[in-house]
Amino acid sequence: MADNMKMRAQFKGDYVEVKLLMSHPMETGRRKNDDDNLVPAHFVQLVTATWNGKPVLEAQWGTGIAKNPYLTFRLKNATVGDKISVTWHDNLGKTATQDILVTLA
C-alpha cells in the first residue's frame, strides 16, 4: 500500500523536514450517502514514524482528521541519507508503510 502515501524528507539547515500526504477516506461514520444510509466509519487511528529504526513520532487520530491527511514534522540531528519510515493503521485493520531517504533541499 505504499501508493497510499507521498513523502518527502529534506535537509534544511540544522533540521530535516518531513512532509507526508496520505490517501485515505477518513469517514466519520456520521455521513449519509445518496440512499440516506450511514457510510461506515473508516479512519486512521495510529501514525508512527521512525528515523533509522528509532521511534520519533506517534500520533493517535480519530474522526476529526480530514480526508487525505497531510502531516509535517521536523527532526534535529538527522543527516542526508538517513532513513525515515512512516506507518499508519486504520480502524478496519488496514495498514500502509512508506520509507524514504533524507535528501538535500
Image (tube, grey):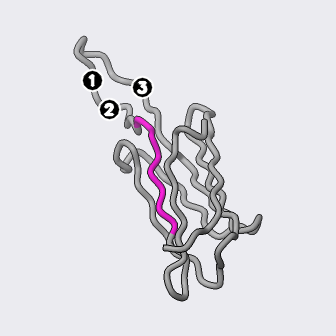
Q: Badges 2 and 3: C-beta atoms under 8 Å apart?
A: no
Q: Badges 1 and 3: C-beta atoms under 8 Å apart?
A: no
Question: Secondary structure beneath disc 3?
Answer: loop
Residue 32 badge: 1
Residues at marks 2 and 3, CA–CA distance in whole angstroms? 8 Å
Q: Within 10 Å of the Cα at label 1, are there few (<14), some (14-19), or many (20+) other Cα atoms?
A: few
Q: x, y (%) of residue 52?
A: 75, 67
Q: Earlier in the sequence, mark 2 or mark 3?
A: 2
Q: Name the residue under label 2.
A: 30
Left/right placement of residue 65 relative to residue 87 reads left
Quadrant where the N terminus is found in the figure: top right
The amino acid type found where label 1 is placed reads Lys
The amino acid type found where label 3 is placed reads Pro
Q: Within 10 Å of the Cα at label 2, are there few (<14), some (14-19), or many (20+) other Cα atoms?
A: few
Q: x, y (%) of residue 3?
A: 54, 38
The amino acid type found where label 2 is placed reads Arg
Q: Name the residue under label 3.
A: 40
Left/right placement of residue 4 relative to residue 64 reads right
Residues at marks 1 and 3, CA–CA distance in whole angstroms? 9 Å
- Residue found farthest to the right: 53
Q: Earlier in the sequence, mark 1 or mark 3?
A: 1
Residues at marks 2 and 1, CA–CA distance in whole angstroms? 7 Å
